Image (spheres, helix red, strand yellow):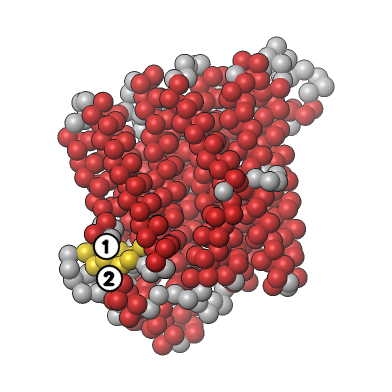
Amino acid sequence: MNGLVPLLVTLPLLGAAIALIFGRRRRVQVGVSIVTLTLVLVIAAVLLYTVDSSGQALAVSVGGWPIPFGIVLYVDRLAALLVVVSSVVLLAVLLFSVGQGAADGDDETPVSIFHPSYLILAAGIYNAFIAGDLFNLYVGFEILLVASYVLITLGSTESRIRTGVVYIVVSLVSSILFLAAIAAIYGALGTVNMAQLSQRMTELPQEVQLVLHLMLLLAFSIKAAVFPLSFWLPDSYPTAPAPVTAVFAGLLTKVGVYAMIRTETQIFRDSEVNTLLLIVALATMIVGVLGAVAQAELKRILSFTLVSHIGYMVFGLAIATPAALGATIYYMVHHIVVQTTLFLAVGLIERRAGSTSVLKVKGLMKAAPVIAVLYFIPAINLGGLPPFSGFIGKFALFDAAADVGTPLMYVLMAAGIVTSLLTLYALMRAWNLSFWRESDEPVDEPGEERIAYLGGAPAATTQTERRVIPRIMTSATTGMVALTVALTVFAGPLYDLCASIGDALQDPVTFSQLESDS
């Protein structure tokens, strides 16, 4: 099975090269992209079954170099699960974009550029998830950065170029911090292999450990959009094409969260910053959701809820118990799927109504009842209504916090409940205004206090032409909605898997185990 591990990265890179060669042949590019991501999904599922059934992780040193001198690829339950979920999301969003491209041509997503960039983005995501050392993790982030900059500026509109520049500058700052941290760690310990670092880090003075720890956390917090380092996200994501926004929102911030989980549990086990993480989680939840409540544009609402729900994952990481880590992994899987689905649903709303402003979109319940359902189900899921996966994940996090029982934990639990309620309010307010409001109801009529306060919200007046919705776009979104329901229906087996991951993270792999697994 070790031979399958490098294919998770090499197949998307090979597919990107083939797609670039056939840049003038749309159907070939589409076929290559779909086949590539399907193969990766199958391989990842096989690897997940293998590592879960055997209880042994897979480690591969690329090029036959002895560990830790070569590039180490490491697949355990956590890495395999996230690669499987990422592959499903990437495949669904790809199908959505295929429908959009077939209907609109190259206006929104130029196919000759989109497919190679999309597959390179996938390779960067997979590489980050299976990286066994910090430098390879950095390489995964840089692959993401290059591909995401191309994708976020597709169409070359002024707003996309402007937000793309902000995105690239912020990402470069994060990368510089990460690279500086790697250099400092290598200079102090002579390795960047995470298994070796878990054994050697304790040799350093506590002050030096704390500095290295904070440098890595700062770099990953920017990528994960943790408050106050999340300022770039609400302005960057909404301007991109709908498929790009969906995959960015679902996956890119989670790569940063994943890096935080790996380093916190593998390298800095005796953390001194858990209290700081709890405070940051509290601020991320509250500030993010308050930003969502103040918005009048659906993509910006979802972007702010994305920030707020990163706070739940940081909260679980800061609790640092096996139960909390398991709940965090489950919530991460839930959020990847549900957030992506909501952005796809908003993409359908934009095409049908010509806008994503709740001040302009109305009457869609009669005009597009299918879209109403496709938005409503993941919206109440993200809001945490029982019995959906959002409720299950939050309840598990709160239960783990209650077991610790400190006053700060109860404050975080209260903040989590408030955040969940305000998320539900923001999403349901948008649903009510966009779907239930009559199409001939005036916006600025004197008595419309319920929406008048949103009149000055950012990007509330953006208007585009209405466009046809191809069946494949609706089908891809429907499939993702079905997957969000499946997270609830099969919550038991999935949560058991996440709980076993949480237990395993409390006993990080050692260098001797890494050599025996390879």
Image-quadrant location for residue 371:
top right
Residue at point 51% right, 60% down? 497
Question: Which label was assigned to residue 518?
Answer: 2
Question: Which label was assigned to residue 221?
Answer: none
Furthest-right residue in this view: 447
Residue at point 46% right, 31% down? 476
Furthest-front residue in this view: 53
Label 1 secondary element: helix
Label 2 secondary element: loop
The answer to whether one can see residue 487 in this image is yes
- Of 490 and 381, nearer the camera is 490
Q: Which residue is mark 1?
A: 2
Looking at the image, residue 38 sits to the left or right of residue 307; the answer is left
Looking at the image, residue 74 sits to the left or right of residue 427; the answer is left
Position of residue 293 measured from the top left corner of the image (x, y, whole percent):
69, 40
The answer to whether one can see residue 180 in this image is no
Furthest-top residue in this view: 440
- Of 517 and 104, nearer the camera is 517
Position of residue 170 measured from the top left corner of the image (x, y, whole percent):
43, 52
Residue at point 70% right, 70% down? 403
Image-quadrant location for residue 201:
bottom left
- Of 17 and 78, nearer the camera is 78
Would you place residue 385 above or below residue 227 in this image?
above
- Of the numbered discs 2 and 1, the one sitting upstream in the chain is 1
Looking at the image, residue 362 sits to the left or right of residue 495; the answer is right
Position of residue 178 measured from the top left corner of the image (x, y, whole percent):
39, 64
Tell me the amino acid under the disc marked 2.
Ser
Circles 2, 1 touching at the beta carbon (< 8 Å): yes
| Quarter that holds the N terminus | bottom left
